[in-house]
Image (cartoon, rainbow, N blue to C red):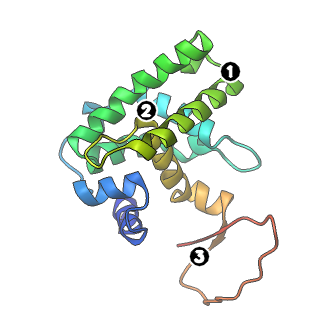
């Protein structure tokens, strides 16, 4: 089973609780003969790396950029999203840059880490408000898609599963009663 298939199965298990899961279920996660480069440029993938790394920056664990989050998002959008959602997502790249220009007087990539974080917090609040009033037929908010793909991609990557989470390779002995100490990392199984 490849990573894309595993992510689709996780989406089913989560019952479509994330936008990404709903889109995977609707669109079916199928790799096509078309390349990701037909939808995303290298610059856009680098841009997505920076957005993801602002959401999950490197601390005592590697950040989202180390997990190759930009490429992950590009592949998932290309292979798993419906064309209407692909359009919202790709348009969102320029909308995010425009929001940065408006808030900080400069593009996202030219902003410092504090400015980037403040902008993404504003966009997260915006998408939460949008979700509350969104009708079923309305398009998803671009930042919600970016954020959820960042989380999904990071925690299903080798870096996220082994460095940010406790990692227990399977097969192995199942122990359903592992002691947990407050402040410990969550568990990841493979």
Identify the mark nearer the N-term, 3 or 2.
2
Report how far apart the C-alphas of labels 3 and 1 lie in the structure.
Answer: 38 Å
86 sits to left or right of 59: left
Closer to the eye: label 2 or 1? 1
- Whether 167 is drawn above or below 78: the answer is below
177 sits to left or right of 183: left
- The residue where tag 2 is placed is 45
Query: Most extreme residue toward the front, as rendered?
Result: 133
- The residue where tag 3 is placed is 169
- The residue where tag 1 is placed is 112
Identify the mark nearer the N-term, 2 or 1.
2
Quarter assignment of residue 189: bottom right
Q: Residue at x 49, y 54 (%)?
A: 152
Q: Secondary structure at mark 2?
A: helix
| Image x and y of residue 57, in percent | 66, 40
Report how far apart the C-alphas of labels 2 and 1 lie in the structure.
Answer: 19 Å
């Amino acid at each position: 089973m490849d990573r894309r298939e595993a992510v689709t199965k996780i989406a089913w298990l989560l019952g479509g609780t994330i936008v990404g899961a709903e889109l995977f279920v609707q669109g079916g996660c199928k790799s096509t003969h078309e390349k990701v480069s037909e939808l995303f440029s290298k610059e856009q993938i680098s841009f997505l790396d920076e957005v993801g790394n602002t959401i999950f920056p490197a601390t005592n664990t590697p950040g989202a950029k180390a997990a190759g989050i930009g490429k992950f998002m590009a592949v998932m959008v290309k292979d798993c999203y419906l064309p209407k959602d692909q359009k919202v997502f790709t348009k969102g790249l320029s909308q995010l840059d425009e929001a940065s220009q408006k808030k900080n007087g400069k593009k996202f990539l030219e902003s410092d880490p504090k400015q980037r974080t403040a902008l993404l917090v504003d966009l997260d609040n915006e998408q939460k408000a949008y979700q509350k009033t969104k009708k079923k037929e309305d398009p998803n908010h671009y930042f919600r898609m970016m954020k959820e793909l960042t989380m999904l991609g990071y925690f299903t990557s080798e870096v996220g599963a082994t460095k940010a989470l406790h990692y227990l390779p399977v097969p192995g002995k199942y122990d359903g009663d592992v002691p947990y100490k407050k402040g410990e990392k969550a568990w990841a199984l493979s």
